[in-house]
Amino acid sequence: MSVTYPPGFRAAGVTAGFKPSGQPDLGVLVGDAGTTAAALFTTNAVAAAPVQVGRDRIGRGRVRAVLVNSGQANAGTGSRGIDEAMATSAAFAALIGASAEEVLPSSTGVIGEPLHVSQMCTAMPTLVGALSADGGESFARAIMTTDTVDKQASAHAGTFRVGGCAKGVGMVAPSLATMLAFLTTDAAVAREDLQRLAAGCLAPRFDGLTVDGCTSTNDTVVLLASGAAGREPVTPGTEAWRELSAGFDEVGQSLVAQLIADGEGATHVMIVEVDGAESDDDARRVAKAVADSPLVKTAVFGGDPNPGRFLQAVGAAHAPVDAARLDVSIGGVEVAIGGVIPPAYFEPASALAQRARAAMKEAEIAVSVRLGDGRGTSRAYGCDLSYEYVRINGEYTT
Amino acid sequence: MSVTYPPGFRAAGVTAGFKPSGQPDLGVLVGDAGTTAAALFTTNAVAAAPVQVGRDRIGRGRVRAVLVNSGQANAGTGSRGIDEAMATSAAFAALIGASAEEVLPSSTGVIGEPLHVSQMCTAMPTLVGALSADGGESFARAIMTTDTVDKQASAHAGTFRVGGCAKGVGMVAPSLATMLAFLTTDAAVAREDLQRLAAGCLAPRFDGLTVDGCTSTNDTVVLLASGAAGREPVTPGTEAWRELSAGFDEVGQSLVAQLIADGEGATHVMIVEVDGAESDDDARRVAKAVADSPLVKTAVFGGDPNPGRFLQAVGAAHAPVDAARLDVSIGGVEVAIGGVIPPAYFEPASALAQRARAAMKEAEIAVSVRLGDGRGTSRAYGCDLSYEYVRINGEYTT
């Protein structure tokens, strides 16, 4: 299904040889002529070369294809990186009869290592030959790095279809977007409206995702609308717009859930719901602070609720917090009420502690934080901090 | 030596039974009549009861003693916690013929578990009996929790002496102070001037310390000046003030270095120096972002320089960063120049990579980040993220 679920798209993934493992590592997604595009990019000040080129090309308004390599991030590569992102995307554009401006380059992998330009160019004819209307799955596989599974999703949106795929298991704490995610629809949408949809509907979803609090240099979310379902554009305020937004929301939420479940070393997923904040922004800061806290993450790994660590994380979130009105529950078990952990929690064989401990054994742990009676809410998706995260990242390039 | 190195102080530490291990867990430090006090407290919005009581008592201007228990943090305990902090410090004050306002309560340990009031009161007479002018070492031991060694320091400051001790190995990322640190001098210093010295000289030192990015609910730094060396107060702008500041700085720096070396699970210390920033505050944000990054910390644990992770952390620091002017070196080896990782780094058997890798094997790893030609500088002390940190915090209360 994936990104080629909506009509109007072809995709492919092949092995160019960027990865020592020999797994597929070069992918492409192409929309038919007339496709519109919108994107969200990382806020990291050290943005990768393809992000810099991509920002410019999205601004020019002609993007309808993305060319993705995995193995080298093409970040920390300076002007050489920019030149190589432009040259390789231009070479690919020529092969499909498009101009370079129509192709958005995207990269993921080791930061600093230059692109393998000759390998990439050698593989391009094979890649073009493999383009197919059901190539979404091979595209989704070609963009993986340390991902253990591919992440794909699709939805119906009224008469339209929405598809998507994503990758990213570490260095994931998007500030506006996750590592790499690509979403498609067969609706026709003007590109300004598509950008509005990205900012309003998808940015909050991907903003709530954090594997390790590390915002990547390469985060990119791309939306492509082929218009294959009919050329009449879908515009804001209509029923079709609401249906399409709901479809993108469904695909975005599914991809976020798949990304966090495959977080590096993750053994448990943690969903932190914050409400009663003065603003959504305050709620977001608290939700991310809890989901990012190493002490909360190790408690989740150890299956030990340790309510004090949740209070500590909320209090240190740099948001207005009145400790006397702070309630925290884990899997529905109230472990702090009005900022106080019930003393019964610390009694031998405490029933409260036992219930909280049972809630921490679930694969998916629901943490609820109420800050007061404000209307601000937010949800963050996090995971635990395990020996495996340390192993993966202590050994990554050696 | 420690906190009783300067004349005018007595201290003691005994076992009251708060810790299952049976180690000493109740300590007291008392300055002679006329002692002045200043303090820095946590910025965590969920401040512990003793922090709330201590803030009030420091404001009243009569504090000359600190009573510290380890085992229970007396945080997340609400009004009961406040009552118990006041009651136990009042009981101790009565035993030494002081008023409650002269005693600052301080606690460290599990958040939420109530104080063991009866155990504490039972142990107090023994504690008072043990008070001694060379009791600094037993005090330093009684305040430890998961610390593996006690942390003590002393310095000469002209004709004066400065002493100090501290504890804290996890939940350490002071925003104004570390877990618990106590510094003393035999100089006479007016309490407003002592507070100035705390804010100007010690806050920047302790601010640079981060074990895990988790600002505690209990962080407290207390300065006590006994005046035993002579009643003439030391005032700002004098040579004696400069000497005394240098003495406090030396003791503060030594305690910070001892704290980070004993960071939970730490196998390497990382000292991040940032210069060329537009402001000290920008430099501080970048230094802390590098020292707190799980990807940098696991790279340090694995002994793999992985320069991209340092670029990622700098770029995500929420400070103005011009990637084109960003230089990073590790142990003096330049791994990024003008935001670019030298391509030679990725060549097989790269001499540059070998030198960087050798630098990462040192017990103390010096990371230097230059942001431009601004005058802002900062230094952060961090440590690696090891299997042992995950083990300690995955198993803490179970």
Image: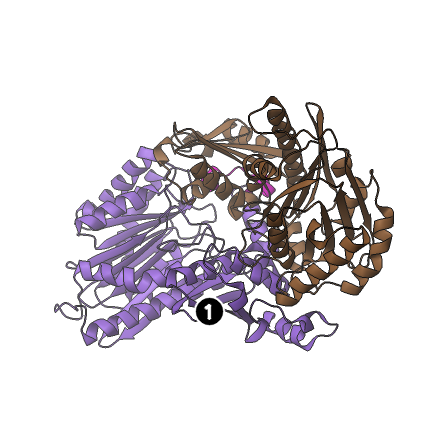
Chain colours: A brown, B purple
Please state which of residues A187 and B96 is positioned toward the viewer in this rendering.
Answer: A187
Residue A304 magenta-highlighted: yes
* Magenta stretch: dominant secondary structure: helix
Chain designation of label 1 = B
Can residue A35 be seen at all in this image of the molecule? yes
Please state which of residues B20 and A238 is positioned toward the viewer in this rendering.
Answer: A238
Q: Give percent across and percent down for residue B342.
A: 64, 71
| Residue corresponding to mark 1 | B372
Please state which of residues B300 and A257 is positioned toward the viewer in this rendering.
Answer: A257
Q: Give percent across and percent down for residue A71.
A: 73, 57
Quadrant location of the C terminus of chain A?
bottom right
Work out whether A185 lies above or below B110: above
Q: Give the magenta range.
A: A299-310
Q: Give percent across and percent down for residue A298.
A: 56, 45
Residue at (27, 53) in percent of width and height: B66
Q: Quadrant of residue B343?
A: bottom right
Residue B278 magenta-highlighted: no
Can residue B364 be seen at all in this image of the molecule? no
Residue at (57, 74) in percent of width and height: B334
Residue at (53, 45) in percent of width and height: A292
Quadrant location of the N terminus of chain A?
top right
